[in-house]
Image: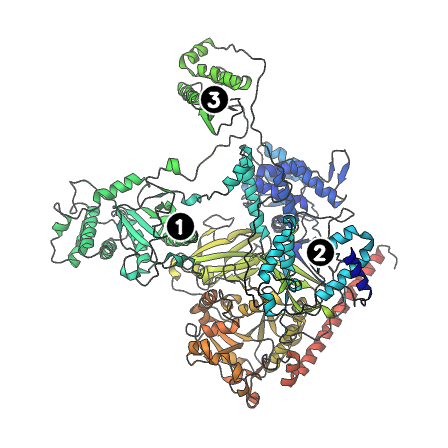
Amino acid sequence: MWMLCAALLALGSVHSVNGDSKAVTTTLTTKWPSTPLLLEASEFLAEESQDKFWDFVEATQNIENDHDDYQTVVHISDTDQAYYDLILKRASVLLSPVQLNLLKFALSLRAYSSTVHSFQQIASNEPPPPGCEAFFNVHGQTSCDAERLKVMLDDALERPKPYLFKGDHKFPSANPDAPVVILYAELGTKEFSRFHQLMLAKANKGLITYVLRHFLSNPSKSKVHLSGYGVELAIKNQEYKAKDDTQVQAGADVNATVIGENDPVDEVQGFLFGKLKTNYPELKEQLKELRKHLIESTNEMAPLKVWQMQDLSFQTAARILAAPSVDALNVMRDLSQNFPTKCDVFVIVMLQPCILCVFCSVFDVLRNEARVMEGLRSLLVDTPYIHDILKLNIQPSDSDYAVDIRSPAVNWINNLETDGRYASWPSNVQELLRPTFPGVIRQIRKNFHNLVMILDPTLENTAVLISVAEMFYSNNIPLRIGVVFVVNDSDEVDGMQDAGVALLRAFNYIADDIDSQMAFDAVISMLNRVPSGGKLKVEHVVGVLEKRYPYVEISSILGPDSAYDNNRKEGKAYYEQTGVGPLPVVLYNGMPLQREQLDPDELETVVMHKILETTSFFQRTVYLVRIACLSPIDSMPNVVPRINSRILSTSRNYLDLAATSKFLSDWAHNDGIIRPVTFWVVGDFDQPSGRQLLYDAIRHMKTSNNVRLGVINNPSENPSNEKSLIARAIWAAMQTQTANNAKNFITKMAKEETAQLSVRAGSFRCLYLDSCHFLFLCVPTQVLKQLVNVNLRVFMNCQSKLSDLPLKSFYRYVLEPEISFMADSSFAPGPLAKFLDMPQSLLFTLNLNTPESWMVESVHTRYDLDNIYLEEIDSVVAAEYELEYLLLEGHCFDVTTGQPPRGLQFTLGTASNPVIVDTIVMANLGYFQLKANPGAWILRLRKGRSDDIYKIYSHDGTDSPAEADDLIVVLNTFKSKIIKVKKKPDMMNEEYKEKEDVINIFSVASGHLYERFLRIMMLSVIKHTKTPVKFWFLKNYLSPTFKEFIPYMAEKYGFQYELVQYKWPRWLHQQTEKQRIIWGYKILFLDVLFPLAVDKILFVDADQIVRTDLKELRDFDLEGAPYGYTPFCESRREMDGYRFWKSGYWASHLAGRKYHISALYVVDLKKFRKIAAGDRLRGQYQGLSQDPNSLSNLDQDLPNNMIHQVPIKSLPQEWLWCETWCDDASKQKAKTIDLCNNPQTKEPKLQAAVRIVAEWSNYDQEIKGIYNNFLEEKERVHSYHDNEHAIYFCTLGADC
């Protein structure tokens, strides 16, 4: 207490602080309207099961006017919290406690808002009839008049059925051929209840197939506030001043709400203010002032000396471990999220906050594990055992069983471990762990991948399978290839009579004489002689042998006395012993491929995918030190000597025996012991065969204490009283007797002599006991007190001898476990990230870390989010972002070549608007991405050359049938869609080509200062260029202010513009610093950012001034190079000490070539795509970027590093003049002037611009004038609309 008093007394002598605490807040909303929680809850239930969905619909169909336990009417207009509680109450009847907790979590995440809105988009395409709050569709006709339903149904079958999606809610119907009626309505409303009852009545009679889709006649005006993302407030390097001096206009921010200090870890310089406020409530105001003073003194952030940082990692770990276990995670979170203001006390190792994609990862994992746990609990498995079961490593179902390929019957064509052609490959299995570009198949000298073909040489498809194997071999794919020839094994048949025997003997002869590779080549030659559609004949084998061995007697090889029958009997015996099915058979590591995968177009793709999938298994095995010298077969636990499809089939059909029906019962010993095995006897018990089966089952039950028995009578003819006496007697016994009594009675009834006697008697006399017992298995469910009940262990991986701060940012993760409410029981405004009491002397930049499938943009803020300087801000920087698009990703391959289809274009749209967005396929992994919002979309090849050259061959992840050319894609999840295409036969050598004649200029900018430079650069281009210009801007990092002004500027100056954006692919190494991300966009995605119609693109840095017509640069001859850059100037001699490319690595790597600057370059996109330059650059980037010391200037170092693989044409020096590197004499010839940073003077950009470029200030004033005109027009428009509203209200009788 004395320390607190001393601190408060000291505070009295401190001058009051200037202004309130500064803060930064961030919110993220969807583009689509907010969706009702009731509808989102129904979609959660639908993922559990359709039965639960329809039960929930029934329970909530009239929730608008529902009653609680106290018979109080709960209206939808009542409090938000009461309505939310009622939803949970209705759902709790259908869900276990753990599932109910997950439902609360899902509603907090708004995880199913996209699913609900996808139905809204589908409904808008109908479109809805005017004035209808709910409506139905009957085979293309829509109405909201219930009286018309019967008329519409009468001729419905004459019209085609509507398209149903995989996510549709289809009511169980007894008549699948009935007309389809789709109801569009909002669950819980009166209109829904009225139509729902009508549809149910008809569906239960088999008159219709009832489908329900969500539809909101009056969507909400508010947006969905999202959570599940992170916000980083990074400290920006102020070595070069890059802050705009334009004053921010005053105005109110939407989410600049009052922020209180309620952090559970509210510690400042050793004072725990949370506990102090609790213990001394009378000192609340003084504590607030003390806290503010301590924060401001802490926020001075004096730089640490190197010796102060060396051991602070260990001190930080000790601080976390010293905290009570209940507080340790909160302490760690506080240290990692507010690291820069904590580092004067101790430093923490790099706890880089990682984004958990709650929507598509964590939430799904929790839910799937909850389902498994619920299932195990329903089997009465105790909790400790559940944990052990969940830890089991379950083999994937599609690779469960393999046959042993270590058989002498296999003729191995190659051996990766011994053949000379693979001598240059590394043999160490640790190579599996070396980072490589995704999709690259590692060439390691180990027989990890084995392909065995079991073939009958005389079958027609043998030749095409052998040709695929030859392709793998000739292209040095790391695959050991083996062949098993299954031929006639009769001793009476020789090679002069049977073509299969002849080929086998010829193979053996050549293998003995030379080697297996030469024998394999001869087999290919023999099969190539077979005409299309024909079969192998003896003369085909003889012809090859005579050509290759003209002096050898053919009969000695093929005839009766041949000594080359090796593996003839063994091959057939191996085939019969393995039981792999009809020929031909292809085994990958012993696992048989499916029949449909043996199509030659498909086989290559399947094997390559198998290699990539299996590589990850071997990587894990190597990492866990389980492989040393073993073959992969030794390390696979799923190898069996024979595959019996009846026993080992992975696709099993199960009867749903959970329900109770007239002919179903389930009984066991009533001694309380659990019986793990259940036998179900299905038979006609009025027939001798059925009774015998039942009798044998009961006899077995008497010998085993671990079995229970269920009985289902399956009459072979229509049952009647006369024909079902025995079955009815058995049923009566099971319904009325104890398990033991019923067993004894049925045992006697199942004996043939008793049954015959009973049938002749025609009746039964049964003794009914005092009581009858029914045994049910209860489902005890553990009520979880928390959302996630996990065992968590944290390992401190401390680093010694730190020389720099490892974390230079503040971080907040936006995630709420349950929806929160205000004091008046209304919904809280929504989740937001709050950075409170931030240091005011630092310059910050704001970054959002969102799930991979989100594309977000800043939509409202008055401030420069790239340069946040709190000293110049009143109180709160409120940043509002919007989820602009969800990403539709995929991979596309030409199944003819196995390569990504070059230049292929896809479009995404609707039936009425076919082209809303388009994209081209990236050569890397055939990757493509499209941007859309939730709904049903049509994915198709672009009309024109793409549609002429290609057709869609197969696809996965869509709602369309396999043969469809236009694919229906319902975007309500975050999974990639896999598309495969095949070239049309008559267009095999065509490529996609288009042209457009315009000067295309690409530029990037982030922050108000660089956007100011960008506008001036554009003006300088327009002033000097006579040809039409189109600017292309990277949308990802532009401010709302720039995006609002650019259409006005384009109209005034007569140029075109387009905003392009591309989500950094998840498989490409991510950059974390905003500036480096922008550098990456400048060079890594040039082949996919722009449409194929763009032949050439000029990149011009935002801080450049153009003094010439850029048509000259566009038409510059690059002499076959894909791009041209300007070399760095070397004329300013005083900067020689800063020319890093003159010595060390760069001097040796360039080998006399020039080092080029990335401020201005021209790209021949046709050539760039033709030589796959984008692929090469991304591949090199993937390797180099793993090293944090590589690619210091990413956009510049990467093309210079790749100068030998992707050549650069050096542009004349006058194309880019920069004062830092070029002397004053060369300035007069400059065609562009770049405001390069000067490492010697570190002069601020604005100051340098005014001094170096005479016309810069005039351009700046002209743009400011245009911008002021824009603001004035904008204000006039707002005033006009305000007046219109006032006049409207006057007409309604309001006071005017």
Residue picked out by circle 2? 266
Residue picked out by circle 3? 718
Image coordinates of residue 243 in percent, x first then y, are: 67, 74
Horizontal side of 114 relative to 1154 (left or right) equals right
**Residue in the image at 65% along x and 47% along y:** 107
Q: Quadrant location of residue 1251?
A: bottom right
Kindly report which numbered mark, 3 or 1, lies closer to the viewer in this rendering.
Answer: 1
Kindly report which numbered mark, 3 or 2, lies closer to the viewer in this rendering.
Answer: 2
Query: Which one is in front, 607 or 798?
Result: 798
Query: Which one is in front, 402 or 1032?
Result: 402
Circle nearer the N terminus (3, 2): 2
Image coordinates of residue 678 in percent, x first then y, are: 47, 28
Secondary element at tag 3: loop
Q: CA distance from mark 2 to mark 1?
A: 48 Å
Q: CA distance from mark 3 to mark 1?
A: 61 Å
Circle nearer the N terminus (3, 1): 1
Residue 1245, above or below 440: below
